[in-house]
Amino acid sequence: MSLLCLSPLITTPAVRNCLVKRSRKGYNVPSWLKFLVIKGPLIIASVALLTMMMIVAVHVIGRALFNVPLFGGVELISLSGVFLISFGLAYAQWERVHISIELMIRRLPQRFQLAFAVSSLATSLLATALLAWGGVVLVWDAVVKPGSYTLILHLPSVPFKVVWVVGCITLWAYFAYHLIEALRTEREK
């Protein structure tokens, strides 16, 4: 039934709305898309963290018991860190759990608090856009000039650079969403 819902040819409301739930603001958002956007970065970052923990455990046990560490273990940990950092930052921004110092801002009037929120989100949006753009340039350079490999395991580095760019774009999209929310809040007041 879910494959039928994805077909644009089916126009019956019951079939068309099988994946769509009405949100509080009145927008139709497919539930699978909402799950993917909200929980996707969390799942990717969690798998990367579990992978890092297992690699570290194997590396430490191999070094302590057999005096032979895991070959390329440090490189695998750092490559898993690409997934963890890029998608972990995006999820933290979605949940708004980044470190923020609100001691001075809380004492300001509401209008100034909103101005600080908008300016910090706009600055973050710009910085993330620059990171994503730099990542796209690095990916394009690695694709045009093949031969970019990791040092120890000789894995191609392009997929990891692409993951970094996708994480930056995801983070940029969350910043843009929160900026639009802040501007709507300001307009409503």
Image (cartoon, rainbow, N blue to C red):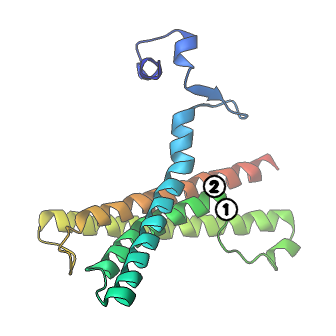
* Residue in the image at 31% along x and 91% along y: 67
Q: Which residue is mark 2?
A: 178
Q: Secondary structure at mark 1?
A: loop
Q: Quadrant of residue 118?
A: bottom right
Q: Amino acid at mark 2?
A: His
Front-lying residue, 152 or 185: 152
Furthest residue toward front: 65
Image side of residue 114 versus residue 125, left or right? right
If you read the primary sequence from the N terminus, does the residue marked by circle 1 or circle 2 appear first? 1
Front-lying residue, 126 or 33: 33
Q: Amino acid at mark 1?
A: Arg
Residue 91 coordinates in the image, percent (x, y): 56, 59
Label 1 Cα neighbours within 10 Å, binned few <14 / some 14-19 / many ≥20 = few
Image side of residue 124 versus residue 159, left or right? right
Location of residue 147 with respect to 10 vertically, above or below = below
Location of residue 11 with respect to 35 vertically, above or below = above
Residue 142 coordinates in the image, percent (x, y): 19, 67
Front-lying residue, 54 or 99: 54
Image side of residue 134 versus residue 153, left or right? right
Image side of residue 50 versus residue 109, left or right? left
* Residue in the image at 73% along x and 34% along y: 24
Q: Which residue is mark 1?
A: 96
Disc 1, disc 2: CB below 8 Å?
Answer: yes
Location of residue 68 with respect to 119 vertically, above or below = below
Q: Secondary structure at mark 2?
A: helix
